[in-house]
Image (cartoon, rainbow, N blue to C red):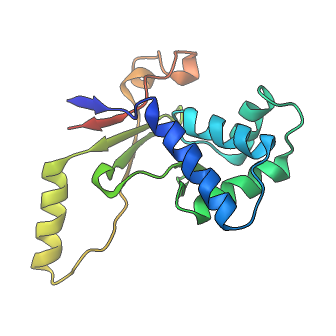
C-alpha cells in the first residue's frame, strides 16, 4: 500500500489557477479570498464551511463566514473544489483532483475520520460489472462506512489521537 500526496507545488498551481479564473470573471483577487484559498488547498482534509472559516480566522481575523461560503462556491464553480455529502449531513469540500487521481472514501462512523483510497483492481471490477449490465459509466462515487482501527482500539480521533497524514492510499 502506498500513499500519493500532492506536492508543495500543487497548492501554488491551484492558487495561480484561481487567480486566473478570478481575472477571467472580472473579479478581484483580494487578500481574504487568497487567504481562504491558501488555507483550503493546504488543509489536507475534507472541510465544512464552519471548519474552513475557523481555520482561516487563525490567519486573518477579518474574514467573515459569508466570504468563506462565497469563495468556496466560486472554487467549486471553477472546478477547483468538490463538494461531498457524507452521512453526517454536512457539506464538506476537498480540492478537486485530476481524473487520474480518482479516489473513493472510507468514513469512520465514530470519529468522522475520512480515508481516501484508490484501487486499480476495484476500478476494473466496477467497469466489468457495468459492461456486463450494459452501462457506460461516466462517473461514480463510493463511500464505505465503518469503524477505523484507532477507534476500535480506543485510540482514535475521538480519544484525542492525531489524524494520520493525508494522501490517497493506493491499495
Q: Is residue 169 above or below residue 95?
A: above
Q: Is residue 50 left or right of residue 100?
A: right
Write the residue at 47% across / 52% down: 96
Along the viewing direction, whichever of 49 and 125 lies nearer the viewer:
49
Q: Position of residue 113 (x, y in %)?
A: 49, 34
Along the viewing direction, whichever of 149 and 171 lies nearer the viewer:
171
- Name the quadrant containing residue 76: bottom right
Count up the numbered dots: 0
Q: Is residue 35 above or below residue 150?
A: below
Camera sees residue 93:
yes
Along the viewing direction, whichever of 127 and 79 lies nearer the viewer:
79
Q: Is residue 27 above or below residue 155?
A: below
Q: Is residue 88 left or right of residue 164?
A: right
Write the residue at 65% across / 43% down: 37
Write the residue at 76% across / 57% down: 70
Q: Position of residue 48 (x, y in %)?
A: 65, 45
Camera sees residue 91:
no
Q: Position of residue 44 (x, y in %)?
A: 51, 33
Q: Position of residue 60 (x, y in %)?
A: 82, 31
Write the residue at 53% across / 23% down: 157
The residue sitting at the right extreme is 62
The residue sitting at the bottom extreme is 134
Q: Quadrant of the C terminus?
A: top left
Q: Quadrant of the N terminus?
A: top left
- Name the quadrant containing residue 21: bottom right
Amino acid at each position: 500500500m502506498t500513499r500519493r500526496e500532492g506536492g508543495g507545488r500543487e497548492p501554488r498551481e491551484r492558487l495561480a489557477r484561481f487567480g486566473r479564473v478570478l481575472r477571467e470573471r472580472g473579479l478581484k483577487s483580494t487578500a481574504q479570498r487568497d487567504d481562504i484559498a491558501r488555507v483550503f488547498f493546504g488543509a489536507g482534509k475534507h472541510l465544512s464551511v464552519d471548519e474552513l472559516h475557523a481555520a482561516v480566522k487563525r490567519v486573518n481575523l477579518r474574514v467573515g463566514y459569508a466570504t468563506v461560503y462565497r469563495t468556496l462556491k466560486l472554487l467549486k464553480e471553477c472546478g477547483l473544489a468538490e463538494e461531498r455529502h457524507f452521512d453526517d449531513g454536512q457539506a464538506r469540500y476537498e480540492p478537486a483532483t485530476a481524473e487520474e487521481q480518482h479516489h473513493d472514501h472510507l468514513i469512520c462512523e465514530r470519529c468522522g475520520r475520512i480515508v481516501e483510497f484508490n484501487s486499480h483492481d476495484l476500478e476494473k471490477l466496477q467497469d466489468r460489472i457495468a459492461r456486463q449490465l450494459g452501462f457506460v459509466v461516466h462517473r461514480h462515487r463510493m463511500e464505505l462506512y465503518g469503524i477505523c482501527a484507532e477507534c476500535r482500539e480506543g485510540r482514535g480521533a475521538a480519544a484525542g489521537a492525531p489524524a494520520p497524514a493525508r494522501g490517497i492510499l493506493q491499495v
